[in-house]
Image (cartoon, coloured by chain):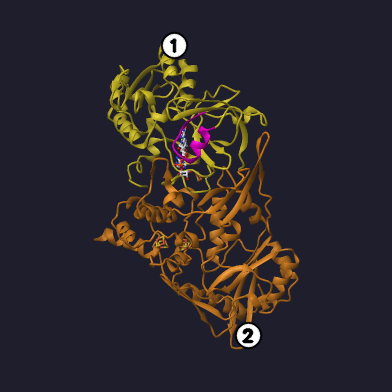
Chain colours: A orange, B yellow
């Protein structure tokens, strides 16, 4: 383990830029922490934390100047690997019929700064989705292959976090090039750095660092323990798959349906949700057409439409599909839960529907 | 995955609202389009969009492929307006096929409703071509009305020239119809099923499949002796877009053909 000063993080960003990476990190925008291109540590949300609850999100000033003192915000890294709107190809009419050209896609080389453990797990999950054993998604995999990941361990947990239940955090265990733990005390502000790959070590060779002292390592451990013991929520995962499969007719779904607006917020903010739609856009002449892939949601009515009918017209069926997919059928499909416990769906649900609470409501309904 | 261009060699109407496209390729060897009975393609109408359509031709026929399409909406309407020589896009073939190898040696009972005969026609060709390798062969087919019956000429020829027992029925007769009136499940007695020796393939509207399966079970077939082909909304056919999910399965990848024992627990859950 190595220790670097806060300012050395700026050098890391600079070095990654010099190496041709498009560096992405957290910034404050429109009252939230979002992920976008950054060029130096001044772009990071220094001294910003957040307040989260079911249906509630607000930034708050911290008094310690922490750069990573916030919990998961409304965006996730999926927007870079699986963009919300992506051109797949375009076609032009010609004398033979038409000709299709693949979108001359650019595949930026991204460096992600500040990936939390739950978010790393979300990337691992989407790795399985977009390499399903039969097909692999070109865009996702081209981007994925080249990303540099600087993980950041959580020193605090948000009120809607439950990564401990999902076994996805708070410590980043694998899959990163470097992992940082931010330590702030009376007179110091530094990072303990773990190198996860040769790419990470190569970078660290360029950065001024010291071998971490026992004290510094202990401080990093404490930070993680603090996060672990402050989880805002828990989700009881024991036997969850059969619980949901067996309870498709539970009245809890009717209760949820009375509140759910079917707004699809939960699926948009979720770092693992992968559903998409295609749109064909044709110009006025009718000679040029483009095919775009866009994010879709199982909460949209058209999602399950077929000619002559629709498989899920009720909101109850759509919510049940979403939650059962996340926590149960995902396990059958990919051998892993579709939920990493980031809490985004809870925070960003306008009516505060809470996936952890709904699971416990189903469990409770069986005891009565 | 990007569609490949194929040319319409022929377009002809099977019924008032079902037409068949015969497709050939100049840019790619036809071997690229070889398929197994039960598989489907995504057909692309320029500027309009794609629809999942089963391949309905003989899989041994190597120079063109056929799709029988019910004109129901946006894309299928555009496809219905094609003319000989027009070009469309195609992706595929996708999906799991009917289990024609596994069911060799057994009596075969096919139950089809409406357009559901199209995905089964390649299986019929196959079984008739390898007739000795199967036992008794029965086709029970129901349509809304005599005029909605798919492939009537072929049905007659099969019955005349081949060792296949065909029974047809319509919901509503017209003045010309001399056959039976009712739903396809009413035909099951004619099949004289020997439950142990029988394997069944079912395709049609979901409600028709439900009643057909109930009837097959009543006649002593086990769940794992029945296969069905399911329809869901499909956008990608690659297992990525999520639309075709049916419980734990992606219908585009693990289906559309399923052994009924795989879906029996969820088949009757409403709005799954
Ligand atoms: C595996 C499979 C095999 C099929 N085989 C045949 C066949 O051999 N012959 C045949 O006539 N039909 C077949 N269908 C049904 C056919 O795909 C639909 O009728 C067709 O997609 C309707 O498209 P549309 O644009 O004309 O209808 P519209 O009603 O205009 O479609 C409107 C919207 O609903 C969506 N949609 C409607 N129905 C479906 C559907 N079933 N699947 C995916 N999206 C849908 C469209 O994509 C679009 O978003 C098959 C479907 C599947 C899944
Ligand atoms: S379901 Fe909710 S808590 Fe789980 S990963 Fe998605 S947004 Fe996060
Ligand atoms: S659960 Fe909440 S966020 Fe999700 S669709 Fe319903 S109202 Fe919207
Ligand atoms: S059609 Fe897209 S996942 Fe099956």
In this rendered view, identify the residue nearer to me: A329 or A46: A46
Residue at numbered disc 2: A188
- View extreme (top): residue: B161
Residue B96 has which mark? none
Q: Is residue A260 left or right of residue B62?
A: left
Q: Is residue A243 visible?
A: no
Residue A118 locus on image (x, y percent): 52, 64
Of residue B28 and residue B34, the one placed in the foreground of this image is B28
Left or right of B42, for residue A309: left
What separation in Å lies between label 1 and label 2 (alpha carbons)? 92 Å
Q: Given the current orientation, which residue lies at the most extreme bottom position?
A: A186
Within-10-Å neighbours for mark 2: few <14, some 14–19, many 20+:
few
Q: Identify the residue shown where x is 33% and y is 36%.
A: B207
Whether residue A310 is visible: yes
Q: Position of residue B36 (x, y in %)?
A: 53, 29
Chain containing mark 2:
A
Q: Give the SS element for disc 1.
A: helix
Q: Is the C-beta separation of discs 1 and 2 under 8 Å?
A: no
Total count of labels: 2
Image mark for residue B161? 1
SS label for mark 2: strand
Residue A307 is one of the magenta-drawn residues: no
Within 10 Å of the Cα at label 1, are there few (<14), some (14-19), or many (20+) other Cα atoms? few
* In the displayed structure image, the side of residue B25 where residue A346 appears, left or right: left
Numbered range of the magenta stretch: B67-81
Query: Any magenta on residue B71?
Result: yes
Q: Residue visible at 38% across and 67% down?
A: A351
- Picture quadrant where residue A239 is located: bottom left
């Amino acid at each position: 383990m190595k220790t670097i000063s806060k300012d050395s993080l700026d050098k890391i960003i600079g070095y990654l830029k010099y190496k041709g990476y498009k560096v992405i990190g957290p910034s404050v925008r429109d009252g939230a922490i979002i992920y976008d291109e950054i060029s130096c540590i001044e772009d990071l949300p220094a001294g910003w934390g957040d307040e989260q609850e079911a249906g509630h999100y607000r930034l708050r000033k911290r008094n310690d100047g922490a750069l990573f003192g916030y919990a998961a915000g409304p965006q996730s890294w999926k927007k870079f690997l699986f963009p919300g709107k992506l051109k797949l190809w375009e076609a032009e009419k010609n004398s033979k019929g038409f000709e299709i050209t693949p979108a001359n896609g650019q595949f930026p080389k991204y460096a992600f700064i500040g990936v939390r453990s739950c978010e790393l797990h979300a990337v691992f999950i989407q790795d399985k989705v977009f390499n399903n054993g039969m097909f692999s998604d070109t865009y996702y995999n081209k981007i994925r292959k080249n990303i540099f990941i600087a993980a950041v361990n959580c020193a605090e947990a948000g009120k809607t976090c439950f990564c401990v239940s999902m076994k996805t955090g708070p410590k980043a265990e694998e899959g990163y090039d470097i992992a940082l733990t931010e330590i702030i005390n009376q007179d110091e502000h530094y990072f303990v750095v773990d190198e996860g790959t040769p790419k990470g070590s190569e970078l660290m060779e360029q950065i001024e660092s010291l071998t971490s002292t026992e004290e510094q390592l202990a401080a990093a451990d404490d930070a993680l323990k603090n996060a672990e013991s402050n989880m805002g929520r828990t989700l009881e995962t024991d036997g969850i798959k059969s619980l949901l499969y067996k309870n498709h007719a539970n009245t809890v779904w009717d209760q949820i349906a009375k509140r759910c607006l079917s707004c699809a917020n939960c699926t948009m903010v979720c770092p693992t949700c992968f559903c998409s739609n295609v749109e064909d856009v044709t110009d006025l002449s009718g000679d040029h057409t483009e095919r775009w892939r866009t994010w879709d949601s199982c909460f949209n009515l058209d999602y399950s439409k077929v000619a002559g009918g629709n498989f899920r017209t009720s909101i109850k069926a759509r919510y049940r599909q979403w939650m059962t997919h996340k926590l149960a059928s995902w396990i059958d499909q990919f051998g892993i839960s579709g939920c990493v416990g980031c809490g985004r769906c809870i925070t960003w649900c306008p009516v505060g529907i809470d996936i952890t609470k709904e699971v416990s409501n189903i469990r409770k309904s069986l005891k009565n | 995955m990007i569609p490949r261009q194929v040319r319409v060699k022929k377009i002809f109407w099977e019924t008032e609202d079902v037409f068949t496209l015969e497709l050939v390729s100049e840019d790619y060897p036809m071997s690229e389009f070889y398929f197994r009975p039960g598989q489907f393609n995504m057909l692309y109408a320029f500027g309009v969009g794609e629809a999942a359509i089963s391949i309905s031709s003989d899989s041994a026929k190597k120079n063109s492929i056929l799709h029988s399409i019910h004109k129901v909406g946006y894309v299928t309407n555009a496809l219905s307006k094609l003319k000989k020589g027009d070009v469309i896009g195609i992706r595929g073939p996708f999906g799991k096929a009917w289990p024609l190898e596994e069911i060799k040696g057994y009596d075969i009972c096919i139950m089809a409703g409406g357009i559901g005969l199209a995905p089964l026609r390649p299986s019929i060709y196959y079984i008739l071509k390898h007739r000795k390798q199967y036992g008794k062969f029965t086709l029970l087919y129901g349509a809304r009305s005599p005029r909605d019956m798919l492939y009537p000429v072929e049905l007659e020829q099969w019955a005349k020239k081949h060792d296949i027992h065909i029974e047809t029925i319509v919901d509503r007769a017209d003045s010309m119809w001399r056959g039976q009136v009712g739903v396809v499940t009413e035909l099951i007695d004619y099949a004289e099923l020997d439950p142990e020796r029988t394997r069944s393939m079912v395709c049609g509207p979901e409600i028709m499949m439900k009643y057909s399966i109930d009837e097959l079970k009543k006649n002593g077939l086990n769940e794992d002796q029945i296969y069905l082909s399911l329809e869901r909304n499909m956008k990608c056919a690659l297992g990525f877009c999520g639309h075709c999910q049916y419980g734990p399965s992606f219908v585009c990848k693990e289906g559309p053909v399923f052994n009924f024992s795989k879906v029996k627990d969820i088949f009757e859950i409403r709005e799954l």
